[in-house]
Amino acid sequence: MALVVEHLSKKFGDHVAVEDLSFEISKPGIFAFLGTNGAGKSTSIRMILNMLTRDSGTVTWNGEALDVMKEKIGYLAEERGLYPKYNILEQMYYFCSIKGMSKKEATASIDYLFSRLKIDEYRKKKADQLSKGNQQKVQLAAALLNNPEIIILDEPLSGLDPVNADLFKSIIREERDRGKYIIMSSHQMETIEEFCEDLVLLHRGKVVMQGNLNDIKRERGRENLTVKADRPIGDIAEKCGLTLVEETPNGSYFKVKSEQDAHNMLAEMMSQGVGVIKFDLSEPSLHELFVEKCGGEVNNED
Amino acid sequence: MKTKGWKEVLAFTFIQQVKTKSFIISTIVIALIVALMAATANILPTFFLDSSLSGEASPLDSFTVRTLYLDNETEYAFDFTEALKPMAVTIKPVTAAEADAKAKELTDTAEQAMLTRITVVDDMFSIDSQYAGGDSGVTKGDCDAVTQTVSGEMHAQFLLLSGLPQDKLATALSGVSVTVSCAGEEPESMVSSVIKSVVPMLSSIVLFIFIFSYSQLVAQSVAIEKSSRIVEYLLTSIKPLALIIGKVIAMCLVSLMQFIIIGLGGGLGFLISMPFGIFTKIDKLVEAAGGAALTGNGLEAQGILGDITKAFSNVDAMALVIMILTFVFGFLLFAGMAGIAGASVSKMEDLASAIQPLSIIGVLGFYLAYFPQVTPEENSMAVVARYVPISSPFILPSDYMLGKIGLPEALLSIAILIAADIGIMVLVAKVYENIIVHTGSRLKLGDMLKMSK
């Protein structure tokens, strides 16, 4: 099974919201869908879900055009919503009914998810009586009601306290382990690195980075060098041709052009008898890659 | 299928709407007020009837007047013996001086008697009756019955004494019936004329309130789903067209239900008040008259009720069907427009300005239906209003019920309304899908159409 998005484009008047977006999720797991504010993520998601007409492009699932009404799809939108004045449980049964679930299936699903998300006590409350975090839990439950095969989570962890963020993460992991195809959008790069293998990064409607995260990092090589020594090492760095990027209590941070530069630095330090407390040569973080690709200019429209 | 799931939307929207406090309270309060108004309208006229008729006459075996002291101060020797024989009333002539003394005596007596003075002032007969008080038990109604008999008999005898032939007497005693009508049309009473003015006006107002207020609720409901972003979640399971269809039909059923409950409240109020109401009162008067025609205000009241019945002679099952069809299709028209207005905003605070054009259309339709009904004559504006979809829902039911139009005209008007509904639903289907997930500033009609291309 595979979800294939090919050449999606959308314009609003003269504004290009999304241009030639293509990606494929060929195996279960969590796919990162990244971008700055206004990069076109929500527009792309809406096109994938057929809420917005596409100017061009196709979305297929198992080789056939994705029929949102037919397939089981779970969606947690970035700007989440519930009916503010209606009873939570009644809203859940309504969502189940439009997803074609029987009353029995609905009850079983609601019972499981409300218990799992620890929101059993809020069943009879109105949405506007709940805290933002609890509303978010209800909405995650709503997204998972019909045991969907494809799950789209737009900023699932935003606004959550650490305890609830961990709860959400554990549920997302469970869904991944059940073989679900999950598209996750987030601005929390650590979370993406924690969960995702493959990604696409949008900037101003265009794909600026795409592929397997480990491959991308591997291609870039290890270029971040952090060194902490028992004495200042500025002279050694200068001798080795390294430029200091930042001095922090954890050490001096350098960008190296090649791994050989780092090796030279270490050799020089050793030859001069410098006590090395920390010598860390690592790949760039996703955060760095993101900023590098999209940095400087952001657009707040989406 | 684009409309799959509309029934679930309908059920949810309907249940949530009828569960709201505002719906429950407004339905109960308005139904009670209408019930009270119906009961009042039924009972109130009986009080005027009582006071104007001075009560009912007792049956003959318990008639409370036995003696009539008659002071005839005219130059005519009227004889009421035969006329009062059925009432078993004995006539005792008295002079003016004796009449004064008798009047004092009757204030506190056990005698079942009354005093009647007949005088002539400025060439006009005057009859003044007083019935015995105290323990006499004489009723005002019986005194009035004797006085009416004396009055009628006095007129008859005066005409005969003046030389009128016996065979012309009945004609001379009957009133002169005056009617003014257009050639080729049935003459119309004043009551009927009033009914034909007031009922359509009330009907227009009531229909406008229901159709317009509930269609605005559709706009509000759509806007809430948009502004709360719940719509994006719903659209992963249901098409926008199904969403709006379910919502519009649900609101239509809610408003129809409230309309019927309020109507039933009025009917119930009328039924409960029936034993004390005007119809029962008239029936009792007719029964008391022993099959004879009613006289005076009783006759007038009977005539008014007859006119009311005649004015609503077209109110049958077909009229109710036409009313419901007009209501439903009129609602669909305005609710469809309201749905688009609601979908054009992303924030609730923009809703008022979004529904402003709808308000203008609604008010325009209302006045187009209302103004022709203020004038009693049939006019070209009324003809236009009956066939223009934005006004026909407010004028058609009353016009059909009052017989201003026949079934073919009513059906034609409904057919045009249905065609307009189809048009608006096609527009809704085209526009709604494309604007429902739009966020940002309010969309104008031009933007919406552009986005739908």
Image (cartoon, rainbow, N blue to C red):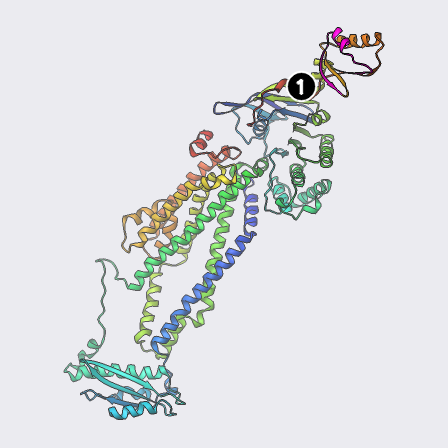
Q: Is residue B342 left or right of residue B295?
A: right
Q: Quadrant of the N terminus of chain A?
A: top right
Give how far across and how far down residue B179 sits, in percent: 23, 64
The residue closer to the viewer here, A246 or A91, is A246
The residue closer to the viewer here, B73 or A253, is A253
Residue at x 38% of width, y 50% of height: B394
Res. A83 image quadrant: top right
Q: Quadrant of the C terminus of chain A?
A: top right
Is residue A232 shown in magenta? yes
Residue at x 52% of width, y 43% of height: B221
Q: Is residue B236 left or right of residue B286?
A: right
Give how far across and how far down residue A65 sits, in percent: 58, 27
Question: From what the image shows, is residue B279 above or below residue A77?
Answer: below
Is residue B157 shown in magenta? no
Give how far across and how far down residue A252 sits, in percent: 75, 16
Q: Is residue A52 left or right of residue A278?
A: left
Determine which residue is flagged by label 1.
A289
The residue closer to the viewer here, B284 or B443, is B443
Task: State whether residue B215 appears in this view.
Answer: yes
User: Element type at marker 1?
Assistant: helix
Q: Amino acid at mark 1?
A: Leu
Q: Which residues are magenta?
A: A226-248
Residue at x 50% of width, y 47% of height: B251
